[in-house]
Image (cartoon, grey):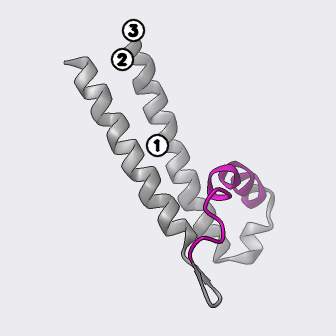
């Protein structure tokens, strides 16, 4: 029962990872970012990305999303390993 619940949470977190990627890709195309879909995706992604905002800025380049993606992926991998260990 618990493993099933954690698996559902894992897949929800995977969907959120793709939302983060979509948010970054939309930032490259300002017209799409200002669309209703772009604003919705940005609203979903901002709570997590706001944590890292401004940490890795060099000139006009903000490398914050890279740090956020790396940490998110590491956490997601550990979460998946935990589910596998609990299932066995």
Which image quarter: residue 31?
A: bottom right
- Residue span colored magenta: 38-56
**Front position in the image: 73 or 29:** 73
Left or right: 67, with 51 as reference point: left
Location of mark 2 (residue): 3
Q: Is residue 36 above or below residue 8?
A: below
Q: Residue 24: give x, y in percent of width and height.
A: 59, 67
Q: Quadrant of residue 53?
A: bottom right
- Tell me the CA gap for discs 2 and 3: 5 Å
Are discs 2 and 3 less than 8 Å apart at CB?
A: yes
Q: Residue farthest to the bottom?
A: 59
Q: Where does the image place residue 78, in percent across and percent down from the top left?
A: 33, 40
Which tag, 3 or 1, sits closer to the chain's start?
Answer: 3
Task: Find residue 1 and name its label.
Answer: 3
Q: Residue at x 64, y 68 (%)?
A: 26
In this picture, residue 60 sits left or right of residue 63? right
Specify the principal SS of the magenta part.
helix
Q: Residue at x 40, y 13 (%)?
A: 2
Residue at the (36%, 17%) spot, across then down = 3
């Amino acid at each position: 029962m618990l493993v099933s619940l954690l698996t559902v949470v894992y897949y929800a977190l995977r969907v959120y990872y793709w939302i983060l990627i979509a948010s970054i890709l939309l930032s490259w195309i300002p017209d799409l970012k200002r669309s209703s879909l772009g604003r919705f995706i940005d609203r979903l992604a901002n709570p997590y990305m706001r944590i890292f905002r401004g940490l890795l800025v060099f000139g006009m380049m903000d490398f914050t999303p890279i740090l956020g993606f790396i940490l998110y992926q590491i956490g997601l991998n550990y979460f998946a390993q935990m589910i596998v260990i609990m299932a066995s």
